[in-house]
Amino acid sequence: MKILPDSDVTYYYENGRTNPVVCTAVCNPTCRIYWKDPYRNTLDGNTLRLGNASRSMNGTYTCIAENVIASLSYSSNTSIEIIVYYPCEIERWFVRSTHNVDVGADVTINCPIEGNPEPLMTWSKDGKNMNIDTTEKYLQLRNVSCEDSGEYTCTADNNIGQPVSQPFNVSVLCEFYPRFVFTSFFKSLYVNSVNYES
C-alpha cells in the first residue's frame, strides 16, 4: 500500500486549505479501499478529502484495503497523522476569576488555555513579571500571606496569532481590624482597672 503525498505527518493551519491524500494498493482480485478518521467513521474511496482545516481534524487517518479470496477476507492498512495548528484561546466557561483564601492556605489558579502547538505560559502579579515560563496551565501559591493578595495574569503564546491573557483576583483574608479592636478593648479594661485600684 502507498499513500501520496508520501509523508507520515501532514501539518495545516486552521482554516487553511487541505490537500487530497490518495491511497493506492496493488490487489488481485481488486480491493475495496476506504479510510477511517480519528473518530472511527468510514470515509469511502481511496482519496481523502477534508476541506478547510479545523482543529477537530487532528488525529490519525487510516487507509484500509480489503479483498476476498476463496471466501476469506484479507486486509492491509497504512496511516497518516494530520496536525492542525490554531492560535491560543481562553476557555472562559472554565475560568474562576476570583479566589478568596485564608492566611496560610494554598491556592491553585487554573488558566484554561487551548492552542496548538502547546502554548508557553507566563505569569505576572499586579503588572510585574513573575519570571515563570511554563507549559503548565496553572499557578500554585502555597502558605499564602497578606502580601500575596493582588491581580495575577496568565499570558499564553504559541506563535500563531496574538498572545491572549486572563486576569485573576486573589484576596487573602487578613483580620487586621478585628485584632486591633480586640487589643484596644482589653487595654482599655486594664487601664480602667489600674485607675480604680489606685
Image (tube, helix red, strand yellow):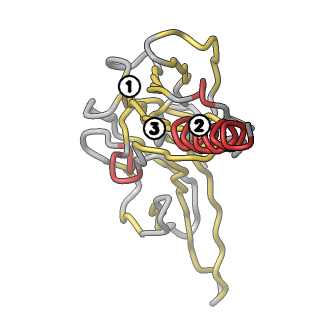
Q: Residue at x 59, y 37 (%)?
A: 184
Q: Which residue is mark 1?
A: 165
Q: Earlier in the sequence, mark 2 or mark 3?
A: 3
Mark 1: secondary structure: strand
45 to 133, vertically: above or below:
below
For disc 1, the neighbor class at 10 Å (few under 14, some 14 to 19, many from 20) is some
Question: What separation in Å lies between label 1 and label 3 (alpha carbons)?
Answer: 9 Å
Q: Residue at x 32, y 19 (%)?
A: 161
Residue 181: mark in rendering: none
Residue 91 pos. (x, y %)? 37, 45
Q: Which residue is mark 2?
A: 184
* Foreground label between 1 and 3: 1
* Amino acid type of the residue tagged 1 in the rendering: Ser
- How far is mark 1 from mark 2, CA to CA? 45 Å
Q: Is residue 81 visible?
A: no
Left or right, residue 154 beside residue 194: left
Q: CA distance from mark 2 to mark 3?
A: 49 Å
Q: Tell me: 94 left or right of 6.
A: left
Quadrant in the picture for the C terminus: top right
Q: Secondary structure at mark 3?
A: strand
Left or right: residue 53 compared with residue 25: left
- Residue found 57% across the figure and 32% down from its top: 7
Mark 1 / mark 2, whichever is N-terminal: 1
Name the spot of residue 131 as percent of width and height, x first. 63, 11
Report the residue at 33% width, 46% height from top.
92
Can residue 89 be seen here?
yes
Q: Earlier in the sequence, mark 1 or mark 3?
A: 3
Three-letter code, disc 3: Ile
- Residue 171, given in percent of the width and then of the height, sits at 49, 38
Mark linked to residue 113: 3
